[in-house]
Image (cartoon, coloured by chain):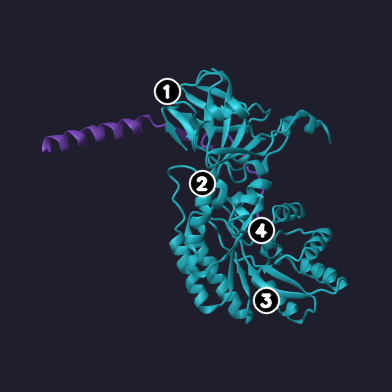
Amino acid sequence: MIKNILLISILYLFVVSCGKKDDPKYIEPGKSGKKTIILINKV
Amino acid sequence: MRYINKKLTIGKFSVETIVKKYGTPTYCYSYKKFKKNILDFKKNFKSFSPLICFSIKSNTNLNLIKEIKKFGLGADVVSMGELMMALKAGINPKKIVFSGVGKTSNEINYAISKDILLINAESENEIKEIEKIANSKNKLIQIGIRLNPNTDAKTLNQISTGKKENKFGINEKQFLELVKYCRKSKNVDLKCLSVHIGSQILNHKPYEKMLRVIDKVIKKAKYKFEFIDLGGGMGISYGKNDKLLNYKRYNIAIKNFLKRYKSKIIFEPGRSIVGNSAFLISRVIYVKKNSKKDFIILDAAMNDLIRPALYGAIHKILPAKKNIKKSNKTYEFVGPICESTDKFSSIKNFQELKENDLVVLHDVGAYGMSLSSNYNLRLKPIEILVKNSKIKVIRKRQTYKDLLNY
């Protein structure tokens, strides 16, 4: 029983960590290059 | 929206099936999602039953507004066109508030003729114009005055509206003078104090501060407002790092406020109702290889969805069909428009894409189609609604005939 729980936990950690590493990563705009400031407001 | 057998699916329809019938680019709305948003919104504030006026500017689709109306919502409009659209959708005029800093005489005239709930004025001259028109018609018109609470909404500068340097509303001193003025007027009936501090707000604290300012101003004005219009601005999550607005805390702050004032609360939500209810489906036209990054050239562009170019907004992008092969290059998702800002996102570790693959941009229901244009003389996309087990076209794809016919 304990052996099974341990095995499941290890597998879970493995899947989660792999998932995180491979997740698509969005690069914030304006971090490199010029930033355009457009003055528009919404009411 | 979820993957079933590696295929991205909306309701019971896979993106591939939708595209086979309707092509790309396509705005696809989920009825289930915005229904849930409306019910959640009502539940969050059920203790004081506010009047919820859907912000038409966030989505101007007639059929969508008709659906929203069925849940008993009113409308917040900012132009004669929006007012006409709200009325066409069958929204009760007594649930319509007209906001905006520059209402023309023509617009005020029209609003008065339609007997709407409130015209929320934003300057002394506007009040005088409403008074003049009302006098010529021998009418008494219900108005609100928009206070600028000088409150930083802690949102993007481009969508912050409640600071003293913003053009919206009037300051406390002017507000108090205008309350006095309205007391004596025979043609305007001051019913409402209105505020709106900005858009995409994810922190309840600016709202709490805003309520403290309103409290102070009402005490000074010694005036009983039948309505307090708190505007909208409730933000949504566009990415997994966004913290969600704490509605409980905002609700508590309003309930405390209402212990002192017996007013009806008005809200003007837009994004929180429709924002996460729509997707923009697009096809990869070309994959343009480059040394450092590859450009994924889509058939959707900034004319279809301008938020990334206008505000630096990031919309999540997912492939319509999953595969396990990741690209080792950064992908820059761009449109075909002749502007460098025609770019949606740069993403590392995206799955490998090839020409004709389909991708889906998320959370485009608010300020997506309503801010779309014909720039580069591109056609506006089709809008469809997935409702129960059916797909309904809620706006046809524009044709070249439509485009060249004006």
Rendering coords of residue B98 (x, y %): 71, 61
Q: Are marks 4 and 2 on the same chain?
A: yes
Q: Which residue is mark 2?
A: B33
Structural distance between the alpha carbons of marks 4 and 3 = 25 Å
Q: Are marks 1 and 4 on the same chain?
A: yes
Which chain does tag 1 point to?
B
Q: Nearer the viewer, mark 2 or mark 3?
A: 2
Note whether residue B166 is visible: no
Q: Are marks 2 and 1 on the same chain?
A: yes
Which chain does tag 3 point to?
B
Sequence-wise, which precedes: disc 4 or disc 3? 4
Q: Which residue is mark 1?
A: B323
Sequence-wise, which precedes: disc 2 or disc 3? 2
Q: Nearer the viewer, mark 4 or mark 3?
A: 4
Near-viewer residue (B68 or A16)? B68
Residue at point 72%, 30% (across, down): B378
Sequence-wise, which precedes: disc 1 or disc 3? 3
Structural distance between the alpha carbons of marks 2 and 3 = 42 Å
Q: Colour of chain A?
A: purple
Determine contact: label 4, label 2, CB under 8 Å: no
What amino acid is labelled 3 in the image? Answer: Leu
Question: What is the secondary structure assignment of the residue under circle 1?
Answer: loop
